[in-house]
Image (cartoon, rainbow, N blue to C red):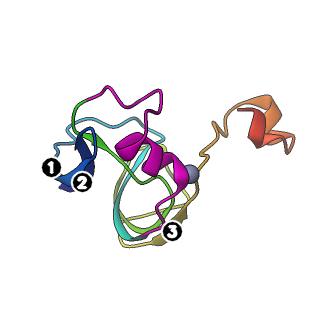
Amino acid sequence: MRGLARIEQDVLGWVDIEIDEYGPYDAICKPLAMAPCTSDVHIVWGHAYMSDAPNRVVGHEATAEVVKVGDKVKDFKHGDRVIVPAITPDWLTVPAEQGFSQHC
Ligand SMILES: [Zn+2]
């Protein structure tokens, strides 16, 4: 799979990435469209706190197609089209199940 990444300060480019492992509640998704946000801009052209990581893949708000799911995922399957929000809570926590997913 390829990812759009911060290669180095002020340089954006494509990198090949391998995703060999994913958890039982995870999904691997192929992006269909992405909305760059100010966090991405700050990572590439600014000095955001995560800017030191080389080849850091950016983009965390997108629409995508599900490619693989973990064995405990029941609500999504290969081929589903989904929205990937900026925040992906841990839905197995009590606050998330009580409707306060922003805290998880
Ligand atoms: Zn964002």
Label 1: which secondary element: strand
Instruction: Tell me which residue sits at (15%, 49%) in the image.
Output: 15
Instruction: Tell me which residue sits at (42%, 64%) in the image.
Output: 77
Q: Is residue 71 left or right of residue 15?
A: right
On whether ligand 1 comes within 8 Å of the CB at mark 3, the answer is no
Q: CA distance from mark 3 to mark 2?
A: 18 Å
Find residue 3 and name its label.
Answer: 2
Q: CA distance from mark 3 to mark 1?
A: 23 Å
User: Residue 25: image x %, image y %?
Assistant: 48, 41
Look at the numbered discs 2 and 1 and tell me whether their residues touch, using CB distance below 8 Å.
yes
On whether ligand 1 comes within 8 Å of the CB at mark 1, the answer is no
Find residue 15 and name its label.
Answer: 1
**Residue 83 sits above or below residue 43 on the image:** below
Residue mark closest to the camera, 3 vs 2: 2
Question: In which image quadrant can residue 20 be found?
Answer: top left
Q: Which residue is mark 3?
A: 82
Q: Is residue 40 left or right of residue 56?
A: right
User: Residue 95: image x %, image y %?
Assistant: 82, 33
Label 3: which secondary element: strand
Q: CA distance from mark 2 to mark 1?
A: 5 Å
User: Residue 61: image x %, image y %?
Assistant: 51, 59
Amino acid at dot 3: Val
Does 49 lie within the magenta span? yes
